[in-house]
Amino acid sequence: MKPNCYEQSRLCLSVMQGCAEKCYFGPRCRFLHDIGEYMAAKPADLGRSCVLFETFGKCIYGVTCRFAQAHLGDGYQNIVNGDLAKQWEGKSLVRNNLSKDLQHQLRKKKFSFKKADAYLRGLAKPHGNGGKGGKAMGLPTEEQEVSNCTTPQEGLGDGPKCAVLSEQGEDPKPDALQSPGPTGSKEASSIKTVGPVTDEDIIKLRSCEKRKLEIQGKLYLAPLTTCGNLPFRRICKRFGADVTCGEMAVCTNLLQGQSSEWALLKRHHTEDIFGVQLEGAFPDTMTKCAELLNQTIEVDFVDINVGCPIDLVYKKGGGCALMTRSNKFEQIVRGMNSVLDVPLTVKIRTGVQEKINVAHKIIPKIREWGASMVTLHGRSREQRYTRSADWDYIAECAKIASPMPLFGNGDILSYEDANRAMQSGVSGIMIARGALIKPWLFTEIKEQRHWDISSGERFGILRDFTNYGLEHWGSDTQGVEKTRKFLLEWLSFLCRYIPVGLLEHLPQKINERPPYYMGRDYLETLMASQNVDDWIKISELLLGPVPPSFTFLPKHKANSYR
């Protein structure tokens, strides 16, 4: 088969890593091996400074970097700033990476799901109610024994932390070192262990001893599909977001070891309270996925997405559809809770149909099933973003949920909106579109003021985002274009911000469509444009010219007005 132009213009990985004499792909390799030929065809550099080289003292992309002139010496040798590189040596800035070994185990179906399998076997057993479920349906014996537990066992503290897969790709704890089960079992006495014995080895973690989720009153950045990526979360953390959550990840894709799905679980070291959100429709895949993450990544909580309104998810029984499938919903929550060492939270909507609210009926059940917290979006699936969020109903549900914390979500774009939301009796607020439109909203809420931010300051935020993006996705052509794509997705929301100094009355409302207006300078006017060509122009100011025949169409309808 004749190689295409794209493959012909790419440099072989073996050359990039200094092993040109032995190509990883053998004689059939389609990529370039001549650096001189590659450099002759490579597009012009996009700038004179490379953020990776300036930050870490070394750019791992070498000659393929689109800012390579900053760190290439004679003979296209990659220059390294030894002193700066030494400062970062051994430090892990991004956690929850997928190792090749774990990916291989998942693809070959060799990963052990002991706890999940035990729970699922319990579901398969016939029950007195005909197998249709019940309060204790599917609960492992140990879970039923401790269901009345009210105080933690002395000496155990907050319980063990979940095992973390190291950045070097070490295996999860071998089976021989796993928790041997309930105290006094024959299985426990027959398992040989290595190293010192801890409480975790001898005593099973009880539900009342799980780590608590202490986030009442904190500002929670919602898990935002596409736009809630790691670079964007870093921006929001800088402006005062307390709690962050990864983008919605599909459990079946995670169980298959898909790299693109595992990338959604990555956590920056600045994210001190961080969770992941899972989407699924069945107890077997969701419970297994929860056990997988419990053993392999470092998170503070796991969230179940029961609020996604899109047809692709809903028609498969996931997202909002779980609100109408109470048996499966219960099995999922109980199952995930039984295998997790960290708190389990649930995000729901008011209901599926526009004028039929059902959240108030479901929330007490969720509390009974073992969830640590619920987040309620004040709209139904059918409403999407065509109506204002119903905060009166959220207030009702907050009373019903007590003592379980309930966070409210919907239409918060100013500190006044946040204050009114907190007066409804919720434990805290989740901010979604408001953070996309103005990420400095977290600062405004904490400082109780309107920030008349200048166009120059806003452009500086965009520059920081692109630097974070190049650091996260790479500074080669592929990384630059991925950064551009996510920047443009974000700009489709940012253009809705109206500068405080131009408003006739404060505050701006999230669903108000402003008339066309001229900003106080050219850049402010450009940032207010809802024309895709102007968004592309802004991206070119930061990332250079777009490739030939480049087009962009916003992925989400959430950026539209009602």
Image (spheres, rainbow, N blue to C red):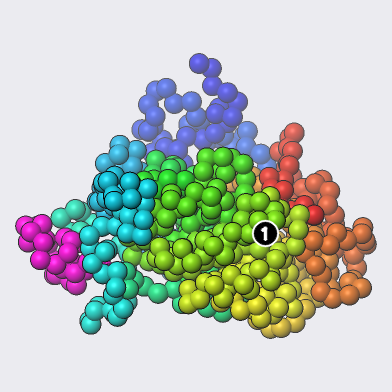
* Residue 487: % across, % down: 68, 53
| Residue drawn at 54 percent across, 34 percent down | 10
* Residue 114: % across, % down: 24, 51
| Residue drawn at 71 percent across, 64 percent down | 389
Whether residue 192 is situated above or below residue 499 in the rendered picture: above
**Residue at the limit of the structure toward the top, as seen here:** 1
| Residue drawn at 66 percent across, 81 percent down | 423
Q: Can residue 275 be seen in this snapshot?
A: no
Whether residue 134 is situated above or below residue 107 in the rendered picture: below
Q: In the drawing, does residue 533 fall left or right of residue 381?
A: right
Quarter that holds the C terminus: bottom right
| Residue drawn at 30 percent across, 39 percent down | 109
| Closer to us: 303 or 195 | 303
Task: Please tell me whether the stretch drawn in magenta is mainly helix, strand or loop.
Answer: loop
| Closer to us: 330 or 221 | 330
- The amino acid beneath tag 1 is Arg
Residue 194 drawn in magenta: yes
Whether residue 65 is situated above or below residue 451 in the rendered picture: above
Q: Can residue 179 be seen in this snapshot?
A: yes
Residue, disc 1: 379
| Closer to us: 246 or 1 | 246
Mark 1 crowd level (few <14, some 14–19, many ≥20, 10 Å Cα) = many
* Residue 249: % across, % down: 50, 50
* Residue 227: % across, % down: 63, 54
Question: Can you tell which quarter of the image residue 7 is in?
Answer: top right
Label 1: which secondary element: loop
Residue 522 drawn in magenta: no
| Closer to us: 104 or 217 | 217
Q: In the drawing, does residue 195 fall left or right of residue 375?
A: left
Q: How many marks?
A: 1
Query: What span is in magenta?
Result: 179-206
